[in-house]
Amino acid sequence: MSTKIWLSSPHMGGTEQGFVNEAFETNWIAPLGPNVNGFENDLSLFLGNDTHVAALSSGTAGLHLGLVLLGVKAGDEVICQSMTFSASANPIAYVGAKPVFVDSEEDTWNMSPEMLETAIKARIVAGVTPKAIIPVHLYGMPAKMTEIMAVANKYNIPVLEDAAEALGSSIDGRKCGTFGDIGVLSFNGNKIITTSGGGALVSHNSDLVKETRFLSTQARDEAPHYQHSKIGYNYRISNLCAGVGRGQMEVLPNRIQQRRDNYKKYYDRYNGKAGIHFVTEPTGYFSNRWLSTIMIDTAAAGFSREDMRLALEKDNIESRPLWKPMHMQPIFEQYEFFGNGVSEKLFANGLCLPSGSNLTDADFERIFKVMDEFVK
Ligand SMILES: *Cc1c(COP(=O)(O)O)cnc(C)c1O
């Protein structure tokens, strides 16, 4: 059997171990230390635009703290993009609130600004104003943030931007994660850069970020003894993981270029073929192309998404259907959903292709050999 080609595997740059060794040599083996501060600095410099960053143990932790900081409480409603990974929506349940799911639009596959406004109006008529909006930048493609922020501002609802997949993506030069009141990043093993596990909360509001550091380290008040006036969390990143992150930040521009090159390879080879559709960047949009994806229209192509996925799997090549929308998930299907059919179609026909920044030319030859059998 040939070696496995993964969808998206970790790709170290080489300097990560130096930062980790330094942590050992100085005995900073704790969820605080120079690497944590250094990693936060690297991230705010990269994001620009006066952003403050708190590094955390995961992106999910960032979304949970984001909702806590926005004051979302039990019984409240939170609007969330339906087409996403469950980690966008689970934190709504952690705070005891109810999700209201909103469908995507065709251009970016992310939250439709029109459906968002429809949902807000309907919920206000029903007597509840949603407490937060969670748009997501799927596979690195920025959501229509200008339009989403306009709707959010019109109804005065804060935005918690799930930028877990979109580090380095931007609209007109402004980085994803810096549009909303709060942005969240992830450094899980499969993301564009990784700390093995980790995340960050991003905001222009430095008080909010200070509060994030406070809450994520058990909310200890200033006192010689342990004194608490708020519920705390153990969500800070380890100084060892942050060391990996500092090394990864040195190669981030490189990783973005490599992922974009992957996309271009698929696009150049298969765009325009019968039944194959790519999602392209609207003017001014820049995607980090975390994952390369295609849509397969079975009738026009003469084969289905599953036909191709299974053929790739047979050759030990990992590919995967797009995210299954939250409104179709057994755990979430009881909740309100404002739909237009887009996310259901994406789930039925979409495929994520191998997208790691460490894919070799030989890997691509193997992938293309299988795909060429279908795409004529
Ligand atoms: C990965 C991911 C998360 C969660 O991040 P973790 O660091 O794995 O907790 C949240 N939202 C989306 C869209 C993701 O892809």
Image (spheres, rainbow, N blue to C red):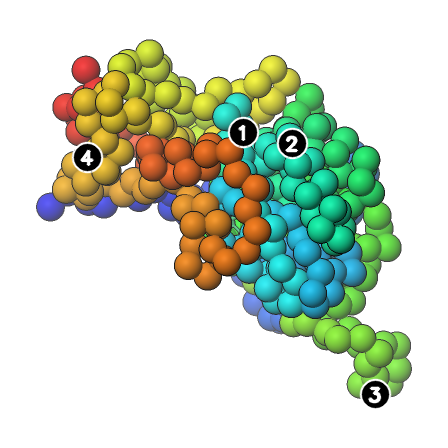
Determine contact: label 1, label 4, CB under 8 Å: no
The first of marks 1 and 4 along the sequence is 1
Foreground mark, 2 or 3, reads 2
Q: CA distance from mark 1 to mark 3?
A: 53 Å
Per the image, the residue denoted by label 4 is: 307
Position of residue 337 relative to residue 279, above or below, is below
The first of marks 4 and 2 along the sequence is 2
Residue 147: where, in percent of width, then height?
Answer: 70, 28
Q: CA distance from mark 1 to mark 2?
A: 8 Å
Residue 222: where, in percent of width, then height?
Answer: 88, 77
Amino acid carrying label 3: it is His
Amino acid carrying label 4: it is Asp
Amino acid carrying label 2: it is Pro
Determine contact: label 1, label 2, CB under 8 Å: yes
The first of marks 3 and 4 along the sequence is 3
Position of residue 111 relative to residue 332, above or below, is above
Q: Nearer the viewer, residue 149 or 262?
A: 149
Instruction: Check disc 3 and report its element: helix, strand or loop.
Output: loop
Q: Give the residue at x 72% y 40%.
A: 121
Instruction: Check disc 2 and report its element: helix, strand or loop.
Output: helix
Per the image, the residue denoted by label 1 is: 105
Foreground mark, 1 or 4, reads 1
Q: Nearer the viewer, residue 322 or 49?
A: 322
Foreground mark, 4 or 2, reads 2
Foreground mark, 1 or 3, reads 1
Q: Give the residue at x 57% y 51%.
A: 336
Q: Which mark is residue 326?
A: none
Q: Is residue 44 visible?
A: no
Per the image, the residue denoted by label 3 is: 225
Q: Is mark 4 within 8 Å of ligand 1?
A: no
Per the image, the residue denoted by label 2 is: 113
